[in-house]
Image (spheres, rainbow, N blue to C red):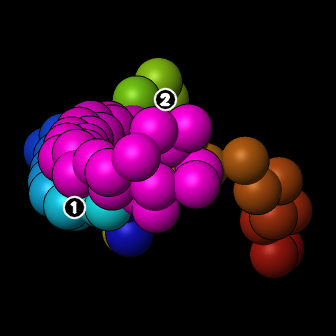
Amino acid sequence: MPETFPSADGSASATRNRTAATTAGGTASETYDQYQAGFDASCELDLVGATRRGSRPPATDWTLPRKASV
C-alpha cells in the first residue's frame, strides 16, 4: 500500500587522504580532507484517490441487472 506521507533520507561522510610525494609532484606528501553529503526526498501522488479509498469497493456497481422471475 502506498505511503500517505513524504519520505526523506540523508547521509554524510568524511575521508582523510594522503598522496605520495611522487604522485603530488613535490618533495613531501600532502594530506587533504574530502567531505560528501547527500539528501533524498520522495512522495507518491495519489491522483485517483486509491490510498484515501483504501480497500472499499467502488461506489458504482457495473453489474447487469437480473431479469425478474415470474
Residue situated furthest bottom in the rendering: 69
Disc 1 designates what residue?
A: 15
Q: In which quarter of the image is the N terminus?
A: bottom left
Q: Contact (CB < 8 A) between labels 1 and 2? A: no
Residue at horizontal 32 percent and vertical 51 percent from the top? 28
The residues tagged by marks 1 and 2 sit, at their Cα atoms, a distance apart of: 47 Å
Q: Residue at x 22, y 51 (%)?
A: 31
Q: In this view, does 5 lie to the left or right of 49?
A: left
Q: Is mark 2 on a helix, strand or loop?
A: loop
Query: Which quarter of the figure has residue 66?
Result: bottom right
Q: Can residue 20 be seen in this view?
A: yes
> Foreground residue, 50 or 1?
1
Q: Which of the 4 image quarters holds residue 2?
A: bottom left
Residue at 76 percent of width and 56 percent of height: 63
Residue ID for mark 2: 48
Q: Where is residue 29 in the image (x, y as percent from the top left)?
A: 33, 55
Residue 62 vs 1, above or below: the answer is above
Foreground label between 1 and 2 = 1
Disc 2: CA contacts within 10 A as few (<14), some (14-19) or many (>=20): few
Magenta-colored span: 19-44
Amino acid, disc 2: Val
| Quarter of the rendering containing residue 35 | top left
Q: How crowded is mark 1: few (under 14 residues within 10 Å), some or many (20 or more)?
A: few
Judging from the image, what secondary structure is the residue with disc 1 in? strand
Along the line of sight, which residue is nearer the eye, 10 or 47?
Answer: 10
The image's mark for residue 39 is none
42, 28: nearer the viewer:
28
Q: Percent from the top left, x then y, of residue 9?
A: 18, 52
Q: What residue type is labelled 1?
A: Thr
With respect to residue 50, does 46 lie above or below?
above
Instruction: Name the side, left or right, on which 68 lies relative to 34.
Output: right
